[in-house]
Every structure is written in C-alpha cells, then in structure tokens.
Image: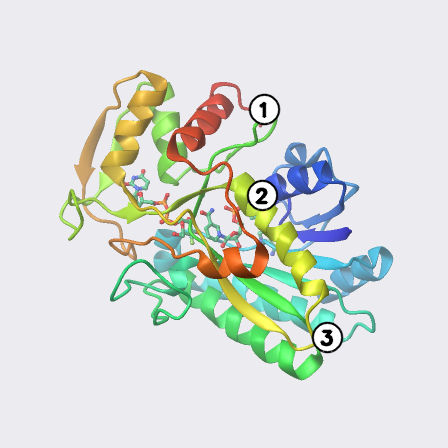
Amino acid sequence: MKFFVIGGAGYIGSHFVKEASRQGHQCYVYDNLSAGHRESIADCQEFIKGDVRRAVPLANALDAIKPDAVFHYAANALVAESVEKPALYYDNNVIGTKTLLEVLMRRKEKPTLVFSSSCAVYGTPKSLPIEESTLLRPMSPYGRTKLICEFMIDDFCRAYKLKALALRYFNACGADLSGEIGESHSPETHLIANILLKTKNGESVSIFGNNYPTKDGTCVRDYIHVTDLADAHMKAAIFLQNQEDGYFHAVNLGSGIGYSNLQILEEVEHVTGVNVKYQFVDARDGDPAELYAVNNKATDMLGFNPQHSNLRNIIKTAWAWHQNPRY
Ligand code: NAD
Ligand code: UFG
C-alpha cells in the first residue's frame, strides 16, 4: 500500500516507516523536522519537508502522491510541557489535525486516516486496567488536545465520509532490532530513554514522586515496543479498507502490564549490569498515578499481537541503540 506519514521522521513514525518498508509498503514522509531526524527515514520512498498546519502544501503533496492511507503522528507530545505551554499544544495538535481533516474532506479520493492518540485521554481512571469505555477525563492540556482531535475526527468521518481509527498508545519505548534507528529527543524526557542515557553517562536519574497510591509509591505505566505499535498501524490501515464510509473507533494499544518507575530502574540494572544512580524529587505536574491497558479491542478488531513488548527486550533494544546512536 501507499502510505503518507505525517510526523514520520519522529520516534514512533520512523519505526513505522522502517517496519512498513520491511513489509513491502511505500512510505512518503511529511514532516517539518521540528523534532524529527531526516537520518531516521532512510527507507522512505520520498521525504517532503512541510508543516501539517499549512493546508496548501499539504493538499499539493496528497494530490501528487494519492496515498491509500494517511498516518498522523505529528504533534507535541510531552505531558509536563503541555501544562507550561498549552498554547503550543492547542496550536500544533488541534489546529494541525483540523487542517488535515479539512484537506482530506475536500478530496475526491479519500485515503483512510490512522491517528496517534494517547492513553492521556483517560486522566486518572477510577478503575484499572483501562478499557476504551473508561471515562475520558484527561488531566493535562496534552491529553485534552488528543481528545479534542478524536472528537473532531469522529465528527468529520460522519459528515464527510471519511474512515479513521484513533490508536491510543500507552508508553512507547524500545528501538528497532537493526540498531539503525531509535529514540532521540532533545531534551530526552521519557523514562526508559532517560535512565539509559543517564546510566551511560554515569549521571543520576530524578524519579518524580514516591508518594503515589501504587505498589511502591512511584507511578505505574504500560510500556509498548515501537515495533509492535508500527505493526498495529499497518493492521489498522488494512482493517479500514473494508469498513463503511463514516467509520470511526478509538482503540487502546498497550502491553496490558503496568510497571512502576522503580521496577523499570531494577530491570535496567539487570540488563545493563550497571548500578543506576537515582534520587526522588517532587511529583511532575499532570502525571496520573497508574495507567495500563486492556488490549482486547485491538486484538479482536485488528489482530494486534505484540511480539516485542516484554520489558527485558524493550530495554535490551533501547540499550543497544543508546550505545551507538546514529543521530
Ligand atoms: P516525536 O516528537 O518523536 O515525533 C513527532 C514528529 O512530528 C517529529 O518528527 C516532528 O518533527 C513532527 N512534527 C511535529 N509537529 C509537526 C507539524 N506541525 N508538521 C509536521 N511535522 C510535525 O513524537 P513521538 O514520540 O514519535 O510521538 C508520535 C505521536 O504519538 C504523537 O502524536 C504523540 O502524541 C503520540 N504518542 C506518543 C507516545 C509516546 O510514548 N511517545 C504515547 C502516546 C501517543
Ligand atoms: N519519569 C521519571 N523521571 C524521568 C522521566 C520520567 O520519574 O526522568 C516518570 C514520570 O513521572 C512518569 C513515568 O516516568 O511517572 C513515565 O514518564 P514518561 O515521561 O516516560 O511518559 P509519560 O507517561 O509522561 O508520557 C508518555 C508520552 C506521551 C504519552 C504517554 C502515554 O510522552 O506522549 O506516554 O502514557 F501520551
């Protein structure tokens, strides 16, 4: 299939491009490189530098390529930053998605849409694990922008005969098995990447909060390998081909297991053989205590079957990348 990958030069998008190319699909990447890396998408058919908020160049690129499916990864995606800078998040995430939807609705041949949503749409759930029917009460501006995008996509699908899935990822992590691409954010704020970088440099990691109502007082998250996310996106695009116009659903993508921040530290020590230095600091704004998924909908609907997401493999692949990062 022909895929148009907005935000494809970022961490999750580039792993999608790698896996989709391996599986024989053609990827056209559209990215403004505000956070992405051109080096991470050597396998793409074509790279177009562009901003999703600019309708004319976006429409022109879609006219030239005529993709079967569009994947919308482009966003600002940090919970704590969104509390400090909500304007940035509403602009890039909400206006970006609205612009894309307006461009898609005007097309005669409408590609299907796979949207990168987040478990941040749930906020602090009343019960665990989290199902798609769990109440949506995002507690950060980031989570709210993702939920607004989901509502917009649902409404546009009904009114303008689009078809879409919103995939609510839990915590993306790990690196491609080739060692050629991996996670490289500046600054790096994600837990596993941060612990590995600090450990490599002999520095101490700050753990945000140790007074949460969880098994050991630190936050609990559900870690899903990026290559499993990539595979789920391809399954989503294939699934959408056979759906009626107007179709929209939101689907969780996690591993189904919750690990505390201290459990992650211990597993890093096990994999690397290095003692991880750390200290507890104040809890971070916008962080829910505990999040982990029920994946039944993704399994039943898409045939989602994570192959890479056991924690040891996640940390091994991420550690291999951080030993020898190419960008
Ligand atoms: P990332 O920052 O690594 O990648 C985002 C990419 O989008 C970058 O290449 C950036 O240059 C590009 N981009 C940003 N704004 C753009 C714009 N206006 N026009 C064109 N390109 C633009 O982020 P990521 O971790 O790969 O996340 C990808 C998506 O997945 C985001 O939508 C994020 O909200 C979602 N998500 C991520 C996680 C996670 O754990 N990383 C979890 C849940 C959901
Ligand atoms: N954490 C630390 N120290 C660090 C980094 C993180 O203690 O140096 C803690 C956080 O407080 C949190 C946990 O580790 O308790 C995970 O934090 P991350 O920053 O790795 O990830 P988040 O859960 O905040 O958010 C990530 C993505 C979002 C996505 C979300 C889904 O950044 O885009 O996962 O849960 F929506």
Q: Above or below — where is 311 with respect to 79?
A: above
The reply to whether the residue tagged 2 has its Cβ within 8 angstroms of ligand 1 is: yes
Q: Secondary structure at mark 1?
A: loop
Residue tagged by mark 2?
Answer: 10
Q: Secondary structure at mark 3?
A: helix
In the picture as drawn, the residue positioned furthest to the top comes out as 273
Q: Is residue 195 left or right of residue 39?
A: left
Residue tagged by mark 3?
Answer: 105
Number of residues whose C-alpha sits closer than 10 Å to that of mark 2, classed few (under 14), some (14–19) or many (20 or more): many
The residue sitting at 63% across, 74% down in the picture is 247
Q: Is residue 90 left or right of residue 108?
A: left
The residue sitting at 38% across, 27% down in the picture is 196
Q: Quadrant of residue 294?
A: bottom left
Q: Position of residue 159 (x, y in %)?
A: 66, 83
Number of residues whose C-alpha sits closer than 10 Å to that of mark 1, classed few (under 14), some (14–19) or many (20 or more): few
Distance Cα–Cα, label 2 vs label 1: 14 Å
Q: Is residue 195 left or right of residue 306?
A: left
Q: Above or below — where is 224 with respect to 50?
A: above
Residue tagged by mark 1?
Answer: 326
Q: Amino acid at mark 3?
A: Met
Q: Position of residue 315 (x, y in %)?
A: 41, 29
Q: Above or below — where is 256 with respect to 115?
A: above
Q: Position of residue 233 (x, y in %)?
A: 61, 52
Q: Amino acid at mark 1?
A: Arg
First-in-chain label (1 vs 3): 3
Q: Secondary structure at mark 2?
A: loop
Q: Position of residue 271 (x, y in %)?
A: 36, 21
Q: Is residue 202 left or right of residue 319?
A: left
Distance Cα–Cα, label 2 vs label 3: 26 Å
Distance Cα–Cα, label 1 vs label 3: 39 Å
Number of numbered discs on residues: 3
Quadrant into which the C terminus falls: top right
